[in-house]
Image (tube, grey):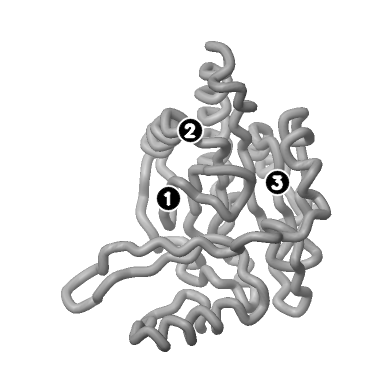
Amino acid sequence: MEVRISGTHFPLETLGPGRRLGVWFQGCSLACAGCMSRHTWAARGGTSRHVDELLELWREALDGGAEGLTVSGGEPLQQPDALAELLAGAAGLRNARAGRGPEGGRAPADLLVYTGYEPAEWTERQERALAGADAVVTGRFRVAEPTRLVWRGSANQRIRPRTALGAVRYAPHLEREATGARLQAVVTPGAGAGRGMGLRLYGVPLRGELARAERALRGTGVSLRDASWRP
């Protein structure tokens, strides 16, 4: 099955516990004010990939010691069939690996999904799409409700464990405030002549953190063009 994505990254260290594979779905009609990922809004943006390609990345990430998979966006529930196939395949690969015995005493990798929808809004199709998720972070980003809670952008958002593994993995973090870095910076090659280098920021910044990062970069002679969090 084809899926429209904005990008992938491993190791992701700011959206869930441990070193993770991050997959960002493309397309979001919720368009939350203040969203730092406006580049993921356009339904026909990003690139088209086959779910099998993403599962191969997951297999490689597991080989590299991945502790989880995080699916964000964009809005994953706006491509529910692709999400369902990705999570089912990822769980199958994870479970097959766990069935071969413990690897250094590590717990099985968990599957985490971010959605701007609340559970009461899920359609039956969207509910089925989340069947393979161990935990879901729910709720629209509300720029006027900042929070220091780990892995969440606003105070209304909730981590909701959905499996026994999710309950064990996320119980310590439901009300925990972040103490380390909330943003992970990754430099990428520029796209096109004269575009320079690219910079991707992964995570959920505190209010004002992106502006401070821009000022700090300008202080070193680096300027940002086309920042995704600016209208």
Judging from the image, what secondary structure is the residue with disc 3 in? strand
Who comes first in sequence, dot 2 or dot 3?
2
Q: Which residue is mark 1?
A: 8
- The Cα–Cα distance between marks 2 and 3, rounded to whole angstroms, is 22 Å
Residue that appears at 77% across and 40% down: 161
Q: Is residue 96 visible?
A: yes
Q: Give the residue at the far top of this rendering.
A: 100
Q: Type of residue at label 2?
A: Gly
Residue that appears at 75% across and 79% down: 144
Judging from the image, what secondary structure is the residue with disc 1 in? strand
Q: Position of residue 200 (x, y in %)?
A: 43, 65
Judging from the image, what secondary structure is the residue with disc 2 in? loop
Q: Nearer the viewer, residue 68 or 230?
A: 68
Q: Which residue is mark 3?
A: 136
Q: Nearer the viewer, residue 170 or 1?
A: 170
Q: Which mark is residue 65?
A: 2
Q: Position of residue 212 (x, y in %)?
A: 55, 82
Q: Contact (CB < 8 A) between labels 1 and 3?
A: no
- The Cα–Cα distance between marks 2 and 1, rounded to whole angstroms, is 16 Å
